[in-house]
Structure formats: C-alpha cells, structure tokens
Image: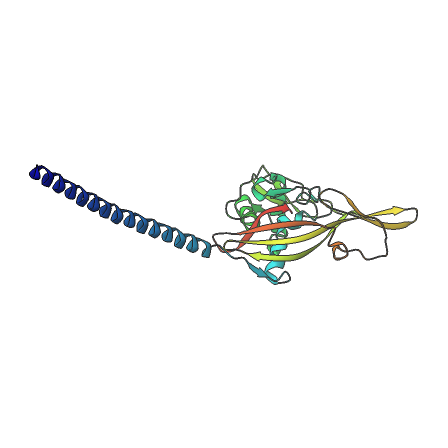
Amino acid sequence: MEKSNYKLKAMFIVAIIILILFAFYGGMQFGKSNSNNSNFNNSNSSISTSDSSNVEEPTSLTPSSDTIINLMNNKAVLLNRQQASTLFGVLYKSKGILAKDLSNEYKVSAGLLQLEDDSSTKDSTVSVEQFKKYMIEVFGSNVSYTDEDVKHPCGPHGYDATIKAYTVQDYGCGGTMLPGYSTSVISVKELDDSIEVTEKAILITPYLDGDKFYSKVTKPYSGEVIVDKIDGGQKVGVSNYLDKADTYIYTFKKDTDGHYYFYSIALQ
C-alpha cells in the first residue's frame, strides 16, 4: 500500500515538473514573438518615416523672373492669345488639356510661331526636318504631329506638300475691335522635373454702343459676365478682377536637354 502511495506521489511530482517546464518554454516563445513583432513595427515605422522624408517639396519661384517670362512666351501659350487666329482661346476654353491631345492644327501653328521668331528664316524655305526643330522647342522631344498647311495668320510661312517644306506665302492679317485676354501670373512652383505656373485671366471684349466704345469683361472658360459695360476710355486689366477671374495652372516639363516645354493647362 505504501509502495502504491509512493508511486502516485512520484507521478504527481513528475507531472507538476512537466507542467512547469511547458509553461516556462511557452513564456520564452511568447516573449520572442513579441520581440519580433516589435522589431517589425519599428521597421515599418522607420520605412514610413523614410518615405515621408522623401516627399518632394515644391520651391516657389518669382513670377516676374526671366525664366517664368520665357516659359509664358512658349508659342503654345502665346497662340492661345493671338487675336487674329481662329485658335484664339482654345486653351482657356478647355477645362484641361495635355499638349499631346491638342489638334494637329494647333501644334503646327505653334511651331510656325516659333519659326517666325527665327529671323534667319524670314525669306527662306524651311524643310520639314528643320521645322521639327521648332516643334521640339515648343512641345519637347516627344512631340507627335503631321506637317500640314494651317494658314497661319500674321506669318509668312505655309506648308507646301509638293516639296515637303514650309515656304514663304502671302497670308493676310489684321482686324479691329478684337477681343483680348488680360492675364497675370500669381504664383510659380518648381518641382523636380516640372514647373507649375498659376495664372489669372479675363476676356475683354470691346464693342460700340451708339457712337461710344465700351468693353465687357467675362470669364474665359464659361463666358460668365464679370462687368457688362465699361467706358472705352477706362483702362481695364485682370488686376481689377483677380477675385472673379478664371484661374489656370500651366505645367512645363523638363526635357532631356534640360529645357522646359509646354505640357498641359488646367482650369482650377
């Protein structure tokens, strides 16, 4: 009987020891798991911090600087304001458009404006290969277009398909009491590979009422009237209507040669 009791006691003690060992081992594994989770969380936190530190901060530029003036003289931008052109206001009347999605007529017309800036071509025939250089200066090296005669206003060159070149032609130009845009660059941001220019714009339309001239001021995109009647002798400019003018954002992308080209415009 005593031997039987002794065996039971021994088995009971062994069972307790085994339970203690299991509990100790389980505690060690739980601690290791928590340590790994902690390290994973710390690693994620470090990655997140690293990622946030790599977010590109824009640099503000002076709107009146030569760099910005030159950008806004890009011929795709200027064509939009050319009063004698049938393409007058195309950019402003779009809610947003990429340069690559502009009509072929618009692209070639902007290229012709760039060509006319080169005094060496004034009385010369320009090959399609030479003309492409002007297109790249406006739209960048990835520009896509087809050579065509666009009857460019106020410019002497037109496309002659028979010789595949832009030749001097006699195009008329002129007009009176034409609508015009008044614009002002209000801010500029430089990013890593692009520059964003924010501009305010209004459309001023002169008209005759009786024997007096007046002007009407409207928003370029919607045509909403800002001021219906202003005396023709009064100076009108966008600075008088900044709070009511339309706001546009131009994006100019950096090309492989380091120069910036017109990429897009969007109504804000």
Q: Is residue 150 above or below residue 199?
A: above
Judging depth in this view, the residue of 146 and 217 nearest the camera is 217
Question: Residue at horizontal 21%, vertical 46%?
Answer: 20
Judging depth in this view, the residue of 229 and 85 nearest the camera is 229
Q: Position of residue 101 (x, y in %)?
A: 58, 39
Q: Is residue 134 above or below residue 61?
A: above
Could you tell me if residue 104 is visible in this image?
yes
Please identify the quarter of the rendering in which residue 128 is found. top right
Residue ranking furthest to the front: 1
Question: Residue at horizontal 71%, vertical 51%?
Answer: 201
Q: Position of residue 191 (x, y in %)?
A: 52, 55
185 relative position to 142: left or right: right
Q: Position of residue 18 (x, y in %)?
A: 18, 43
Q: Position of residue 215 (x, y in %)?
A: 83, 50
Badge count: 0
Could you tell me if residue 118 is visible in this image?
no
151 relative position to 46: left or right: right
Q: Is residue 13 above or below residue 234?
A: above
221 relative position to 18: left or right: right
Question: Residue at horizontal 62%, vertical 47%?
Answer: 265
Point out the image quarter for the N terminus.
Answer: top left
Judging depth in this view, the residue of 99 and 40 nearest the camera is 40
Question: Residue at horizontal 17%, vertical 45%?
Answer: 17
Q: How is the image coloured?
A: rainbow
